[in-house]
Image: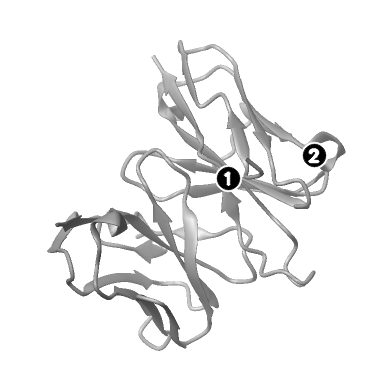
């Protein structure tokens, strides 16, 4: 079993929809949780990161961490076609080194 | 462009040949990471450097793989006697050490894609 599980999708939604992306994990030592966005043939870019449990909001993006359930989520409001990409969750015990990534969920937002 | 630069972007080689990838990090970043990403999977950690010191290597990094970062600047990743299972995207990332007034965020390059025939 992988340390981090993520549904690969694809997830297809119409423009303007609220998108929910999720990951579960097994290692209770993880304390830092990140979401990366990766466009085709590009490297991942950091969207958001949170430490421990709680919510964090940045514009149309909200990240949630529930350590008791070992479950993290990324919500995208008012989704746009430009949001079409693969979204990777990642987590680590200390700081940013040695990230453990999920498989990524491919998101398609249609106009 | 002051981002992380990787070369070559795509390398096609025959099984058994050696290949080398180069990564030029963002100039003030003292940490450099190598990850490998296969189709439909997330990146997997291979190794990382703080300045010129290689601090950790994954068990994924077999004896055929070697990484260097001479003088704490650019880094090279060499794969000897390539196998078809080595076909993947090799991603380099760099960061400033967490706590030095920075978040420690990793900035990734666009990757070097290896195809082993």
- Same subunit: marks 1 and 2: yes
- At horizontal 14% and vertical 57% (from top left) the residue drawn is A111
Q: Secondary structure at mark 1?
A: loop
Q: Chain of mark 1?
A: B
Reading the image, the residue beneath label 2 is B73
Q: Is residue A47 above or below residue B64?
A: below
Q: Nearer the viewer, mark 1 or mark 2?
A: 2
**Residue A38 percent coordinates (x, y):** 40, 51
**Residue A27 percent coordinates (x, y):** 47, 72
Left or right: A6 in relation to B106: left
Label 1 Cα neighbours within 10 Å, binned few <14 / some 14-19 / many ≥20: few
Nearer to the camera, B26 or B74: B26
Q: Is residue B9 above or below residue A12?
A: above
Q: Is residue B18 above or below residue A19?
A: above
**Image quadrant in which the N terminus of chain B is located:** top right
Reading the image, the residue beneath label 1 is B59
Marks counted in the figure total 2
Q: Secondary structure at mark 2?
A: loop
- At horizontal 39% and vertical 59% (from top left) the residue drawn is A88
Looking at this rendering, what residue extends furthest in the right direction? B71
């Amino acid at each position: 079993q992988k340390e981090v599980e993520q549904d690969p999708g694809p997830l297809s939604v119409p423009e303007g929809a609220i998108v929910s992306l999720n990951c579960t994990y097994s290692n209770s030592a993880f304390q830092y949780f990140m979401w990366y966005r990766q466009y085709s043939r590009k490297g991942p870019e950091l969207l958001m990161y949170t430490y421990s449990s709680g919510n964090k909001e940045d514009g149309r993006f909200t990240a949630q961490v529930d350590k008791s359930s070992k479950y993290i989520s990324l919500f995208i409001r008012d989704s746009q076609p430009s949001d079409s990409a693969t979204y990777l969750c990642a987590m680590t015990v200390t700081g940013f080194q040695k990230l453990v990534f999920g498989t990524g969920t491919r998101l398609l937002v249609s106009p | 462009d002051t981002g992380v630069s990787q070369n070559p972007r795509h390398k096609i080689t025959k099984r058994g040949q050696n290949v080398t990838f180069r990564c030029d990090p963002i100039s003030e970043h003292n940490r450099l990471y190598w990850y490998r990403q296969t189709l439909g999977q997330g990146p997997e950690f291979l190794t990382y450097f703080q300045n010129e010191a290689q601090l950790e290597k994954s068990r994924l990094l077999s004896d055929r793989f070697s990484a260097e970062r001479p003088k704490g600047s650019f880094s090279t990743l060499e794969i000897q006697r390539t196998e078809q299972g080595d076909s993947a995207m090799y991603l380099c990332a760099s960061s400033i050490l967490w706590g030095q007034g920075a978040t420690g965020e990793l900035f990734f390059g666009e990757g070097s894609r290896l195809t082993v025939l």
